[in-house]
Amino acid sequence: MTRGEDSAVIVDDLHITYKVSLERKTSLKNALVRRTRKQEVRYREVNALKGVSFEVPQGRCTGFIGANGAGKSTLMRAVAGILPPTGGQIEVNGKVSTLLALGVGFNSALTGRENVILGGMAAGLSRGEVHDKFQEIADFADLGDFIDMPMRTYSSGMFSRLAFSVAVNMHPDILIIDEALSAGDAKFKEKANQKMSELMGTAGTMLLVSHALATIQELSDEVIWLHKGRLIHRGDPKETCERYLDFLKVGDEAIVMEDF
Ligand SMILES: Nc1ncnc2c1ncn2[C@@H]1O[C@H](COP(=O)(O)OP(=O)(O)OP(=O)(O)O)[C@@H](O)[C@H]1O
């Protein structure tokens, strides 16, 4: 596998640990009471990623699969720069655009139009550039009059259509798509798949998380299977998905015996 200049993303021995407070409510009153009684706040640590390493070559699509809680979204948030690594390193060569970050950045009190403009500026475009792109984004999302309605009135499908449209039309070097298409309807999914293939044709690099194995196989050059925070297998999309499906049939026991 190529390293260095040919890699868009290099992840090296990545560890991510979430610290979760076990207190029911972290109100100011509770915090003050705890302080006066000198009580410690109790935390639980969740080791979401435990030493994951891989590279994504420039212009390639890598698919990520794995059971619920495997660490896929955590990994995408870390590559997008939203979550700092607890240990290890992430090197990203290029401008990253992520549906995740843009979707999260949307303010539901503002209209679709206002969010597109703010989202574009957050992605580093000038106001003029965003205005130039606005029509392209609105046409692709195809939301009609809803583009001028507050986003709290949107269905989840409409929300993800706009997020997808913003992300892909920013022409990023690296596009991260985390299960974002699940909320779109069949027609939009087809349009989105076509757009993703088109993006890959123009040498875009993509990291794609999905439980839809058919989509993963169709779009990915390589697939990485995560399980409980570890990279279990990495390789040919069809072969990796088949291994994963076999695992889903036989359960946890078999994988522990077979792969460790
Ligand atoms: N904000 C958070 N705070 C604490 N723990 C978290 C947080 N987000 C995720 N986790 C935990 O980290 C682990 C990995 O979660 P993650 O969402 O990355 O998995 P996933 O593979 O994307 O799952 P899914 O397929 O269900 O979306 C899980 O044990 C989850 O409970």
Image (cartoon, rainbow, N blue to C red):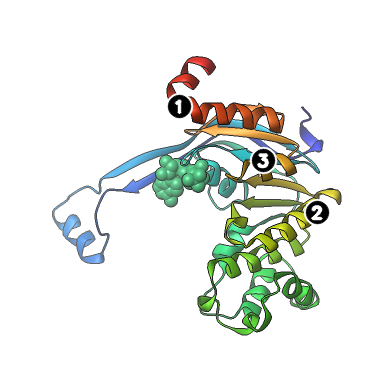
Q: Is residue 12 visible?
A: no
Residue at x 69% of width, y 63% of height: 188
Q: Are marks 3 and 2 in contact (CB under 8 Å)?
A: no
Q: Which residue is mark 2?
A: 199
Q: Crowdedness of circle 1 by 10 Å Cα count: few (<14), some, many (20+)?
A: few
31 relative to 121 in the view: left or right: left
Q: Amino acid at mark 1?
A: Gly
Q: Which residue is mark 1?
A: 251
Q: Nearer the viewer, residue 2 or 72?
A: 72
Q: Are marks 1 and 2 in contact (CB under 8 Å)?
A: no
Q: Are marks 3 and 1 in contact (CB under 8 Å)?
A: no
Residue at x 78% of width, y 55% of height: 194
Residue 95 at x, y = what percent? Answer: 74, 54
Q: Which residue is mark 3?
A: 63
State the count of labels.
3
Does mark 1 have its CB less than 8 Å from ligand 1? no
Give the foreground label among 3 and 1: 1
Q: Nearer the viewer, residue 42 or 185?
A: 185
Residue at x 63% of width, y 84% of height: 148
SS assignment at label 3: strand
Residue 255 at x, y = what percent? Answer: 50, 21
Q: Is residue 22 visible?
A: yes
Q: Nearer the viewer, residue 106 or 224?
A: 224
Q: Amino acid at mark 2?
A: Leu
Does mark 3 have its CB less than 8 Å from ligand 1? no
Up-down relation of residue 106 to residue 57 (above or below): below
Q: Quadrant of residue 207?
A: top right
Quarter of the image where the N terminus is located: top right
Disc 1/disc 2 C-alpha distance (Å) = 36 Å
Residue 53 at x, y = what percent? Answer: 62, 31
- Mark closest to the chain's N terminus, 3 or 2: 3
